[in-house]
Image (cartoon, rainbow, N blue to C red):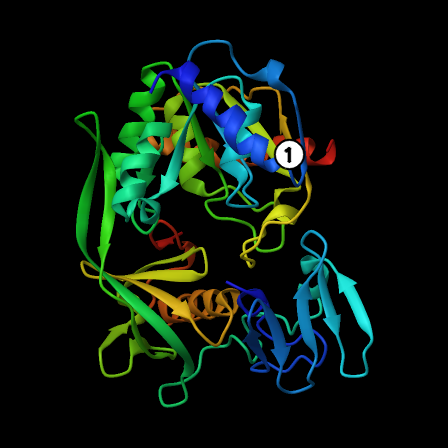
């Protein structure tokens, strides 16, 4: 799907529906690179997060999505139209890593929920080690993204959507050197993890 | 999903198996308190005398019995006195490629229809009554997904466990603690990661 058409869809249809019951604001779009590859790492509060984050982001995102979402034929057809690609979270999934690197190499923006799952209580969680390893392997700018309020709209333990004020904040890009050797990535992983945690927390604090 | 997927015990009386689903709400069979979602993610508890208390989920969770590794809710039990839960189980039998414009972009699972049974977890094994039983050291991952837990046997099947009368965070903690203890007992090492596969330091 062409980027313009896709962005128009994400900005218009889901947000028009959302504005019937809630409010939405975003900040920090100036931190999104105008061109070239980057990795967007965000916290994860709700199944609604992809709609809000893409609506706030001026570039089309390629979201890494859990493989079970692709189980039905309808979703298998629909999700790739919005650049989503599956990841099997119960094993090392080399195909998912290949797709991330391939899409970055093509100059795209890949979105990964760094925590790997939605928060049960709305509070941010630690990034998964695998996400940080991918960031260090890719060596592209990492844009931290903080979403708040989506938990109030639709928390993990509930089936219903409620009125809420949702805010998406993009932080200044973090720059990690590309590390091709596994030992190097492991040596830098904890420091990179801390930087990502701090950057996402900063965005939540400003909300 | 509903409030009993979040709370592993009643936040008011702290009874472990007290909460049950009452449509989208929860009711404690021990103290008769009810819990419902209110504004945003706020949860309102109504005690039998009619008093209502509204708190955020994180505040309610802080009231629950802790999931300490040494505590009675989580500490691994010897064979014969296993933790038990009523579960709905789906097994993955193979993967299906996901393609987009001719490009392989990943894989998704082919799941069996759900099967209801009793899950048992003790200090040595996890199993589904009358179906399968794995030594804990053969489990390669403990991965929560939505309201279910994915576990996988080494070189074998992925199963998706949906807890019908218990909360996922409680069972995730039980799996983590049992696996850590089993790895230590067998001298395999100290587990540092549970996803996407179990890794030791």
Going by the image, does A31 lie left or right of B122?
A: right
Q: Position of residue B32 (x, y in %)?
A: 68, 84
Task: Please name whichever residue, A95 or A198, is drawn nearer the observer in this view of the structure.
Answer: A95
The x and y percentages for residue A152 are 66, 48
Q: Between B31 and A137, which is closer to the camera in this rendering?
A: B31
Q: Is residue A84 above or below residue A68?
A: above
Q: Is residue A190 left or right of residue B187?
A: right
Residue sticking out furthest to the top: A35
User: Which chain hosts label 1?
Assistant: A
Disc 1, SS: loop
Asked whether residue A40 is in view, the answer is: yes
Q: Is residue A30 left or right of residue A63?
A: right
Residue A195 seen: no
Q: Looking at the rendering, which quadrant does residue A183 occupy?
A: top left
Q: In the rendered view, does A21 fall on the left or right side of B85? A: right
Q: Quadrant of the C terminus of chain A?
A: top right
Q: Residue at x 40, y 55 (%)?
A: B194
Q: Quadrant of residue B133?
A: bottom left
Instruction: Please give the residue where the numbered disc 1 appears in the rendered image.
Output: A19
Residue sitting at x 53%, y 25%: A12
């Amino acid at each position: 799907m062409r980027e313009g058409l896709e962005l128009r869809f994400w900005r218009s249809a889901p947000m028009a529906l959302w504005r019937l019951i809630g409010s939405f604001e975003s900040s920090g779009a100036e931190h999104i690179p105008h061109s070239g590859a980057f990795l967007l790492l965000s916290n994860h509060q709700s199944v609604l997060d992809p709609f809000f984050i893409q609506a706030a982001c001026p570039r089309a995102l390629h979201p890494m999505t859990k493989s079970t979402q692709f189980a039905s034929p309808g979703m298998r057809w629909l999700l790739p139209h919005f650049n989503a690609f599956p990841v099997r979270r119960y094993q090392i999934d080399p195909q998912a890593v290949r797709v991330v690197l391939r899409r970055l190499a093509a100059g795209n923006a890949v979105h990964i929920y760094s925590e790997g799952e939605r928060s049960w209580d709305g509070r941010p969680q630690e990034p998964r080690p695998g996400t940080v390893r991918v960031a260090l392997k890719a060596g592209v700018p990492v844009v931290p993204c903080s979403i708040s309020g989506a938990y109030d709209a639709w928390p993990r333990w509930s089936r219903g959507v409620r009125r809420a004020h949702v805010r998406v904040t993009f932080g200044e890009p973090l720059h990690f050197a590309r590390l091709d050797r596994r030992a190097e990535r492991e040596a830098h992983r904890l420091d990179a993890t801390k930087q990502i945690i701090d950057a996402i927390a900063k965005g939540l604090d400003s909300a | 999903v509903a409030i009993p997927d979040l709370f592993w015990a009643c936040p008011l009386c702290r009874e472990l198996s007290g909460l049950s689903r009452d449509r989208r709400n929860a009711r404690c069979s021990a103290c008769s308190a009810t819990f419902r979602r209110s504004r945003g993610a706020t949860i309102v508890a109504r005690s039998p005398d009619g008093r209502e208390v509204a708190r955020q989920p994180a505040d309610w969770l802080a009231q629950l019995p802790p999931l300490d590794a040494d505590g009675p809710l989580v500490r691994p039990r010897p064979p014969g006195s296993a933790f038990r839960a009523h579960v709905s189980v789906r097994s993955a039998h193979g993967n299906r490629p996901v393609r987009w414009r001719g490009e392989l972009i990943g894989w998704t699972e082919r799941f069996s229809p759900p099967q209801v049974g009793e899950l048992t977890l003790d200090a040595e094994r996890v199993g589904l009554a009358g179906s399968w039983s794995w030594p804990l050291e053969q489990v390669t991952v403990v991965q929560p997904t939505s309201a279910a837990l994915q576990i996988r046997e080494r070189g074998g099947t992925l199963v998706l466990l949906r807890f019908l009368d218990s909360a996922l965070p409680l069972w995730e903690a039980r799996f983590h603690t049992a696996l850590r203890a089993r790895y230590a007992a067998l001298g395999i090492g100290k587990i540092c990661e549970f996803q996407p596969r179990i890794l030791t330091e």
